[in-house]
Amino acid sequence: MCKIIVMANQKGGVAKTSSTRNLAYSLAELGKKVLAVDFDPQTNLTISFGVAPAALQETTASLMMKLVMDEALPEKGSYILNIGKVDLLPSKKTLTVAEVNLLIERKDDCLAKLLAPLRADYDYILVDTGPSLGSLTINAFTAADEIIIPVDPELFALVGLKELTETISKIKQNLNPKVEIIGILFTKCSKRTTLYRQTSEQVRSVFSHLPIFESQIPATVQVGTANSKGLSVMELDAKSPAAAAYMNLAKEVLAYA
């Protein structure tokens, strides 16, 4: 059975895109069929796969507009890109236009409609979202089976987390009763610092009701370097601590029932 996992946190700079990219590759390395979906107008996930958004015809932007306008969708071969071990549904900056129309038309289920027929082709569909709780993220939550919340354990780590979890609770009550938060993922971890220890302990205390992944992604330039080269960190350096951490995360995700 396919699972749709959304990577979400309205706070920027917490490694949502990097985590989507590297979790997707790690799951594929473990033998799973994976689709990564760029649902952020910033198009960082698309770029991290080495794809230039401007050259694309069909993306999440055009597909959302077709769904808003109740138009027929094209064949999936026209918008799903096969990139190594992972398939990609790319984005374009015009997704911002679709976002406005989703809000005006009050359509919260367009992404769910787009992904529903794709479930049969994949074990996991991973959705990267932008730093907001707008109509795109609401659509992602409505489509999701599971949500991962990346958190950078620094000074402002708790900012917005309460609002985020409350929004997910409302989605669960009103739009998508099956959705679950499967874990908080600590990213950019500098375990030797006092700030890391204090902040991670604070998150564990305040959100003790939520699961927290044992895997923690270390702070390293290798992740950013891999993104800039259109690679996963495992393809750049399979022996790096970040590659090992994302592989361990993938195993935790597989073990979640």
Image (tube, rainbow, N blue to C red):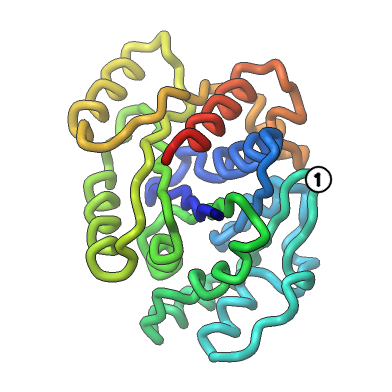
Task: Pick the residue in front: 29 or 207.
Answer: 29
Using residue 210 as the reference point, say whether residue 106 is left or right of it: right
Task: Pick the residue in front: 247 or 117.
Answer: 117
Task: Pick the residue in front: 191 or 28.
Answer: 28
| Residue 161 spot, x, y in % from top left | 28, 44
| Residue 112 spot, x, y in % from top left | 49, 70
Give above or below for 45 relative to 201.
below
Q: Identify the residue at image location x=52%, y=71%.
A: 96
| Residue 219 spot, x, y in % from top left | 52, 22
Residue on which the image places disc 1: 84
Residue sitting farthest toward the top? 192
Q: Identify the residue at image location x=60%, y=23%.
A: 242
Name the amino acid type tagged 1. Answer: Gly
The picture quadrant where one finds residue 64 is bottom right
The picture quadrant where one finds residue 77 is bottom right
Give above or below for 220 relative to 177.
above
Using residue 81 as the reference point, say whether residue 202 is left or right of it: left
Element type at marker 1? loop
